[in-house]
Amino acid sequence: MSTNKEHQPFGSLSPAVMRASTVVFNSLEDFVQRKQRQPDGFSYGVTGTPTARLLEQRIAALEGGRHCVITPSGAAALMTTVMGFVRGGDHLLMSAACYGSLKTFGEKWLARMGVELELYQPSIGAEIESLIKSNTRMICMEAPGTVTMEMQDIPAIAKVAKQRGVLTMLDNTWASPLGFKPLEHGVDFSIEAATKFFSGHSDVLMGSISMNSHEHYDILRETQSILGQQVSPDDCFLVLRGMETLQLRVQAQSESTLKVARHLSQHPLVDRVLYPPLESDPGHAIWKRDFSTNGCLFSLILKPAPERAFHAFFDTLQHFVIGASWGGVHSLAAYYPAALQANRPFPATDQPVVRMSIGLENTELLLADLDQALVAYGKALTAN
Ligand SMILES: *Cc1c(COP(=O)(O)O)cnc(C)c1O
């Protein structure tokens, strides 16, 4: 929380929304030299306005980093980071559990632009050293992994990478910097989908890239502007507002999520709960060592059943809405078909995955809702 001294003398507690495509200059000399204002200053709307810079400063402070570049979505933050540093002829290592569109970008675009893309097993840890080649430029990580929630030994990977002169980036959206601070563990770039926890209300898309190196910041500011990744100041306002309650939301959702996940892990129709905060999860030890919040997102593998049972489960839910994304105040449920996982390198499962995002609703209501949906699932499972 802050008191917004930045916006004196008017003294509103609320940040000013400053809009601009054109930025005006006092003299021709000033205009001619405008590039020198980068990476922090303002010369054209694409690099942002003071509203964007305020948000970037808040995010950098939360990450324990010196610099931040915001992007129009979490996906854009991932692609911009890779585009800033990886070129044809480079080798790029990416966890098989990284965010889907980052993998697709790697496979459909980068590979055809001469980048050697290699997907690695998320649990690899320090063994990643055996995959590093002379042309390895960057290692992409995400923990817990998208949908299947595999933990990664982030400090071990960052250490090896540093020794070998390889850049590292971590998609830290699940934990947010309140649960884990990647930069303090040797990671070069901490990526957040601000769409999720930061904004918190399912009404805006945004991403952030935080870092310590000024040289990297310079490169990413240029990449962000060359790619035209402009962020609307109105959207910055929404994320700035969301961040005022971030800590309270994360705390409440984190507590509720652990209760819901524990409850489900004891249900006879649940095969596995993919969720590192549970003692039974293979990633629990690393999670406990490195992370300090439970997140608000976990996945379920239900007892095998025909497709109609999943329809019965989802269509019975009253308090959970069906939808993609997560991290907002409303609880959500999403479905990922078996084939999506089974076709992946190093698959975590060959079963359909149900993913739940826990919001701020009363936990008891959510538990009752899930119990009802599982009753419907069980009925559909046994009916013929
Ligand atoms: C949602 C999400 C993204 C993408 O963010 P968008 O703002 O929706 O583009 C990236 N990584 C993770 C882990 C996410 O959950």
Image (tube, rainbow, N blue to C red):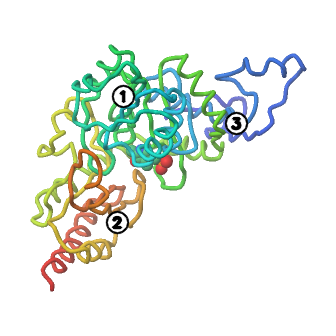
Q: Quadrant of residue 119?
A: top left
Position of residue 113 measured from the top left corner of the image (x, y, whole percent):
52, 37
Where is residue 87? Give x, y as percent.
52, 28
Q: How many marks?
A: 3
Ligand 1 within 8 Å of disc 1? The answer is no
Residue type of the residue flagged with mark 1 = Lys
> Quick check: marks 2 and 1 in contact, CB under 8 Å?
no
Label 2 amino acid? Answer: Phe
Q: Residue at coordinates 72% horizontally, 27% vertically from top-left? A: 42
Question: Looking at the image, can residue 197 be seen?
Answer: no
Q: Which residue is mark 3?
A: 46
Residue furthest to the top: 163
| 12 relative to 38, above or below | below
x 53%, y 55%: residue:
203
Residue 100 on image: x %, y %: 40, 49
Residue occupied by mark 2: 320
Mark 2 lies on a secondary structure that is loop
Single out the residue that lies furthest toward the bottom.
384
Residue 51 versus residue 35 in the image, above or below: below
The C terminus appears in which quarter of the rendering? bottom left
Q: Earlier in the sequence, mark 2 or mark 3?
A: 3
- Residue 138's spot in the image, x, y percent? 41, 27
Q: Secondary structure at mark 1?
A: loop
Q: Who's the residue at 66% across and 39% down the image?
A: 228
Mark 2 vs mark 1, CA separation in Å: 30 Å
Task: Give the residue at mark 1.
Answer: 181
Cβ atoms under marks 3 and 1 closer than 8 Å? no
